[in-house]
C-alpha cells in the first residue's frame, strides 16, 4: 500500500530547477532511504513531501488528497520532519524543546495533557536523553543535540517520520542506536520512515526500499537488491563499486570503490545525458 505519492513534481529555487518531473510512491509502514550526491535534490524532495516548501507544478498526495489542501495541524499529526540543520534552540531545556512536538495536539491555551507528558517522557527515554531532561539544549554535544531533535519528532506521534541525515554529528555507536531505534519504530509500531542517508551501507542495511537520485531526478527506485547495483552506483555517484553481502544481515553492501577516471567518467556522463535527452523526446 502506498499512502504518499508525488506526480510530475517540479521544484525550483528562483530560476534553478532542483527537482524535475519527479513521480514516486512511498510504501506505507516501510523504511525508505534516499541516496544521491550533494545537491541532487534529496532534501528538497523531503521538504516538498512534508509541505515545508511549495512546488511549482505537479502534486504531492496523501491518502489520495493533495497535502496542499490539508489542515496544518491535521497534517502535523500525520507526518514529522527532522531537517538537516534544525533551528537553534538557545535557552530551551531538553524537555521544553521535545514538548514542541506536542503542538499539533494542543487546544485552547495550549496546556500539556497527561498524554502529552507521557509522550515526551517516552521520546526522551527511547532516544537515551532522559538524564538531560532539565539541561539546556545548547549545553549539549552535537550528538546529544541531534538526539533531542529526534526525540521532538518522535513526541509528535506521527504515522510518518521524515529525517534528513539523522546520523549527522553522531559517532558510530550513536549512529547505530538512532537507526536501530527507527527500525524498531517501523517494525513494532508500523511507522513509515523516510530518510536521507549518505552512507550507502547504512541505507541498504536499514531500508526496505531505496530511491537513488541524481540532478533532481530518480535514477532507480526499488528494493535494496535492485538499487545497490554496480551500474546504478556508477551512474549516480560516478564510482566503480564492488558489491557484496553484509555477513550479518545478508543485505547488499558496497565493499570498496574507485572513482571513475578519464574517459570512463566522461563516457558515463555522456551516456546519462543521452538517456535524459532520449527520454524527453518520448
Image (cartoon, rainbow, N blue to C red):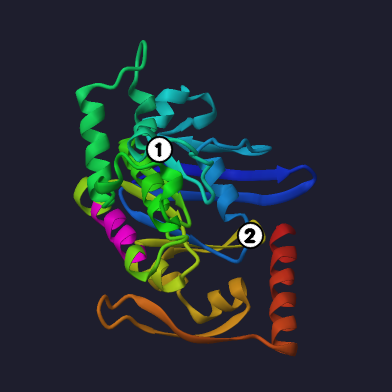
Residue shown at 37% from the left, 46% from the top: 148
Disc 1 target residue? 79
Q: Label 2, secondary structure: give it.
A: loop
Residue 260 coordinates in the image, percent (x, y): 65, 85
Residue at mark 1 to residue at mark 2: CA–CA distance? 23 Å
Residue 4 coordinates in the image, percent (x, y): 43, 42
Compared to residue 183, the image places residue 246 above or below, namely: below
Q: Which residues are magenta?
A: 175-184
Taking depth in this image into account, of 110 and 247 the one nearest to the observer is: 110
Task: Indicate left or right for 280 with 101 as reference.
Answer: right
Q: Label 1, secondary structure: give it.
A: strand
Residue shown at 69% from the left, 69% from the top: 275
Taking depth in this image into account, of 216 and 98 the one nearest to the observer is: 98
The image quadrant that residue 270 belongs to is: bottom right
Whether the magenta-drawn stretch holds residue 183 is answered as yes
The image quadrant that residue 253 belongs to is: bottom left
Residue shown at 37% from the left, 12% from the top: 109
Residue 47 coordinates in the image, percent (x, y): 55, 43
Residue shown at 27% from the left, 55% from the top: 181
Can residue 111 be seen in this snapshot?
yes
Amino acid at each position: 500500500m502506498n499512502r504518499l505519492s508525488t506526480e510530475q513534481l517540479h521544484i525550483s529555487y528562483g530560476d534553478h530547477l532542483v527537482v524535475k518531473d519527479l513521480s514516486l510512491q512511498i510504501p506505507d509502514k516501510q523504511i525508505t532511504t534516499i541516496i544521491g550526491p550533494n545537491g541532487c535534490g534529496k532534501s528538497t524532495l523531503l521538504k516538498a513531501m512534508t509541505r515545508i516548501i511549495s512546488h511549482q507544478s505537479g502534486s504531492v498526495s496523501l491518502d489520495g488528497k493533495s497535502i496542499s489542501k490539508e489542515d496544518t495541524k491535521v497534517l502535523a499529526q500525520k507526518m514529522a520532519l527532522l531537517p538537516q540543520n534544525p533551528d537553534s534552540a538557545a535557552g530551551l531545556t531538553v524537555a521544553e524543546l521535545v514538548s514542541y512536538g506536542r503542538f499539533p495536539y494542543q487546544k485552547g491555551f495550549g496546556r500539556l495533557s497527561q498524554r502529552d507528558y507521557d509522550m515526551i517522557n517516552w521520546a526522551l527515554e527511547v532516544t537515551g536523553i532522559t538524564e538531560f531532561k532539565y539541561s539546556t539544549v545548547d549545553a549539549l554535544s552535537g550528538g546529544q543535540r541531534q538526539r533531542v531533535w529526534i526525540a521532538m519528532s518522535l513526541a509528535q506521534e506521527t504515522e510518518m517520520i521524515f529525517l534528513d541525515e539523522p546520523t549527522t554529528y553522531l559517532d558510530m555507536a550513536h549512529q547505530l542506536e538512532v537507526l536501530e531505534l527507527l527500525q524498531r519504530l517501523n517494525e513494532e509500531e508500523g511507522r513509515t520512515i523516510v530518510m536521507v542517508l549518505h552512507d550507502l551501507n547504512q541505507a541498504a542495511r536499514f531500508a526496505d526500499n531505496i530511491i537513488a537520485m541524481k540532478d533532481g531526478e530518480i535514477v532507480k527506485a526499488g528494493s535494496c537488491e535492485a538499487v545497490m547495483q554496480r551500474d546504478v552506483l556508477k551512474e549516480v555517484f560516478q564510482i566503480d563499486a564492488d558489491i557484496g553481502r553484509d555477513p550479518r544481515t545478508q543485505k547488499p553492501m558496497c565493499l570498496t570503490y574507485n572513482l571513475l577516471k578519464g574517459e570512463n567518467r566522461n563516457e558515463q556522463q555522456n551516456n546519462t545525458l543521452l538517456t535524459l535527452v532520449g527520454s524527453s523526446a518520448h
